[in-house]
C-alpha cells in the first residue's frame, strides 16, 4: 500500500510517500506527478523517509518526472532514502541522475 501526500515549501512541491512503491500503485503516483507538472510545478522533492520498497516501476516514475521537469528547466530531488533504497538507486545508476539528500530541509537548500 502507498500513501501519497504533498505540501508546498517555497518554490517546491514536497511529495511524501509512505509504504511500498511498486507495480500495483506506481500508476497512481505517475498520474499525480504528471498532473502536478501539467499544473506548472517545476520543482519537486520526493520524501522517501517512510518508503520501505521501490520497484523498477517506481524508478520509472521518478525518471519520467525528472525528464518532464528538466524539459522546463526544473529539478527533481529525493530525500530520506534508507540504506536499502539507496542501494537500489546506486546499483541501478539512478543515484547519478538525482540530487539525493538526507532530509527535506537539505533538499530545499541544495543548489
Image: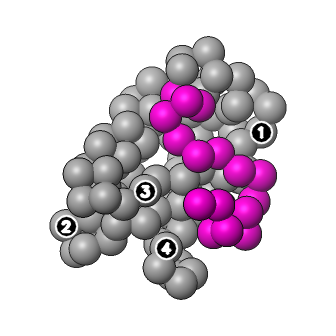
Residue highlighted by disc 2: 38
Give the secondary structure at mark 1. Answer: loop
Q: Is residue 72 left or right of residue 43?
A: left
Viewer-nearest of labels 2 and 4?
Answer: 4
Give the x, y percent position of residue 103: 75, 60
The residue singled out by tag 3 in the image is 75
Write down the residue under mark 1. Answer: 82
**Rendering coords of residue 98 (x, y %):** 53, 41
Q: Give the SS element for disc 3.
A: strand
CB-based contact (under 8 Å), mark 2 and mark 4: no
Callout 3 touching callout 1 (CB < 8 Å): no
Circle 4 packing at 10 Å, graded few (<14), some (14-19), many (20+), is: some
Front-lying residue, 5 or 87:
87
Disc nearest the viewer among 4 and 1: 4
Q: Earlier in the sequence, mark 2 or mark 1?
A: 2
Mark with earlier residue (3, 4): 4
Q: CA distance from mark 3 to mark 1?
A: 22 Å
Q: Can you say which quadrant of the picture contains the C terminus?
A: bottom right
Residue 12 is labelled as: 4
**Residue drawn at (73%, 63%), measured in percent from left and top?**
106
C-alpha span from label 3 to label 4? 9 Å
| Residue in view at x 31 percent, y 51 percent | 70
Residue 66 among those drawn in magenta: no
Helix, strand or loop status at disc 4? strand
* Between discs 2 and 3, the one toward the N terminus: 2
Specify start and end residues of the magenta stretch as a single range.
Answer: 94-111
Left or right relative to 107: residue 15: left
Identified at 49% across, 34% down, the residue is 97
Q: Earlier in the sequence, mark 2 or mark 4?
A: 4
Q: Write down the quadrant of residue 23 in the picture.
A: top left
> Residue 30, relative to residue 63: is it above or below?
below
Amino acid at each position: 500500500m502507498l500513501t501519497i501526500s504533498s505540501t508546498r515549501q517555497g518554490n517546491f512541491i514536497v511529495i511524501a510517500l509512505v509504504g511500498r512503491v511498486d507495480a500495483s500503485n506506481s500508476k497512481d503516483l505517475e498520474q499525480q506527478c504528471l498532473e502536478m507538472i501539467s499544473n506548472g510545478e517545476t520543482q519537486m522533492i520526493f520524501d522517501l523517509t517512510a518508503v520501505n520498497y521501490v520497484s523498477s516501476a517506481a524508478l520509472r516514475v521518478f525518471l519520467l518526472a525528472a525528464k518532464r521537469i528538466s524539459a522546463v528547466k526544473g529539478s527533481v530531488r529525493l530525500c530520506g532514502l534508507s540504506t536499502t533504497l539507496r542501494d537500489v538507486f546506486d546499483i541501478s545508476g539512478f543515484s547519478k541522475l538525482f540530487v539525493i539528500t538526507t532530509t527535506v530541509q537539505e533538499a530545499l537548500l541544495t543548489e
